[in-house]
Image (cartoon, rainbow, N blue to C red):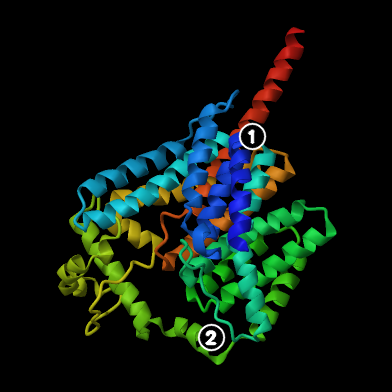
Amino acid sequence: MRDIFLVLVFPFLLYFIFKRPYIGVSLWIWSAMFFPNGWVWGFASSLRYNMLIALATILSYFFQRNKIKTDVSGLTVLILIFFIWSTISSVLTLSNPSVVWFEWNIFLKIIIFYFLCIFVIKTKHHINVFLWAICLSAAYFGAAEGLKYIVTAGGHTVAGIPGSRLEDRNELALALNMTIPLIVFLLSQTKSKWLRLALMGAVAFNIVAILGSYSRGGTLALIVVGGYFFLQSKRKILVSLFLVVAVGVSSAFVSDEWTGRMNTIETMDQDTSFLGRVMAWKQATLMALDNPIFGAGFKAGQNQALWMLYEPDFYKLNFIVDTTGIHFPKAKAAHSIYFQVLGDLGFVGLLMFLSILLITYRKLSWVTRNTDDEWLIGLARMLKVSLIAYCAGGAALSLPYFDLSFAIFALAHILCELIHRQKNKVTIKREGHRYA
């Protein structure tokens, strides 16, 4: 039934994309995170929905009339340079070229997605559609998983979306942490009583899903998000009550296994999983020291030959965490957006990546200071919380080239552009009155 429904509806979605390219980028981020192929079987699962949506969006933009000019920003230029840097790194890679160019191809699609976002999203309505698309992707799945966790009294272990970018439960927990602030923003803009109740339920169930994922990084990121959200909010008492209720309900269903896993945070220096991550960080650092400009290439840290090459030198960084006597027969993923970029693209690449994060945060702060529009201010504040969630949760995850993070980068650019256009309109009106 799902197959038939999706195949029948999809042509209509493509039609609307051709009519409105902003619908295309909204469906792009939705399909990238929700992965519709994983929800159907048979003939419908063989269609490449994300690729078809991307092609339709690109064509729709090129044939669009009366395009609104897109401003050039330092953030956009830096993102383009970052991609060019990754391309040079891929050419000079020390790793398996087939793996490197596969990852480069994924990153290329994300970069195209970023540029299409800033080219076609121009109004508040466009932004709202885009935000709803994000919240109806990972957050929809997270709410369902959170509900299952409650219904089974903690017996259900939250897992990622099979076959998607969020297949790993840790990556799902990160995406949910990043999405919750956006749901809160939509909640503040929604007047319908029933829709508000649904959004509040979505926030609560997603918090439960993060805890039920058993992701230590996700739990730490949730604490950071809760604290930062509390500081940013004007309704601190209401926020406090909501957080207490959500966490209280969640804690009533946690198992001894969950408690034991969270307790390992206090003894990380004795935890095998954590020590494996430390060794991966050491390898990334050693690769960057040998290749400080362009790094070793995408996912070089997971190359078995490079792991065996650098493992004898891990002791040189024992002043960080002593891993003497620890041995892993297989290469470990970086489990950190920072160390992965360091190993992939070197110290220069890491500097650019950190600069992108910092510039995005500063742009969002600039928005809150340079407009009286409460809608823009509220969205900028929630996007800052999402960015903080990414920076905090990403410290323990290998997800530096992530569709949702680049969606936030794009929204930061778009909000600044929107304010500039508003100011220019006011200036033109004033000049018109002066010469009338």
Going by the numbered disc 1, the residue's amino acid type is Ile
Secondary element type, mark 2: helix
Q: x and y percent of residue 87 in the render? A: 29, 44
Front label number (1 vs 2): 2
**Callout 2, which amino acid?**
Trp
Disc number placed over residue 419 in the picture, else none: 1
- Disc 2 residue crowd, few under 14, some 14–19, many 20+, Cα 10 Å: some
Q: How many marks?
A: 2
Is residue 380 visible from the viewing direction of this image? no
Question: How far across and down, in percent of the image, does residue 113 sit?
Answer: 48, 44
Q: Residue at x 45, y 63 (%)?
A: 394
Q: In this view, which residue lies farthest toward the top?
A: 436
Q: Label 1's element?
A: helix
Assign the N terminus to one quadrant of the image.
bottom right
Q: Which mark is residue 258?
A: 2
As measured in the structure, the alpha-carbon distance from the residue carrying label 1 to the one carrying label 2 is: 46 Å
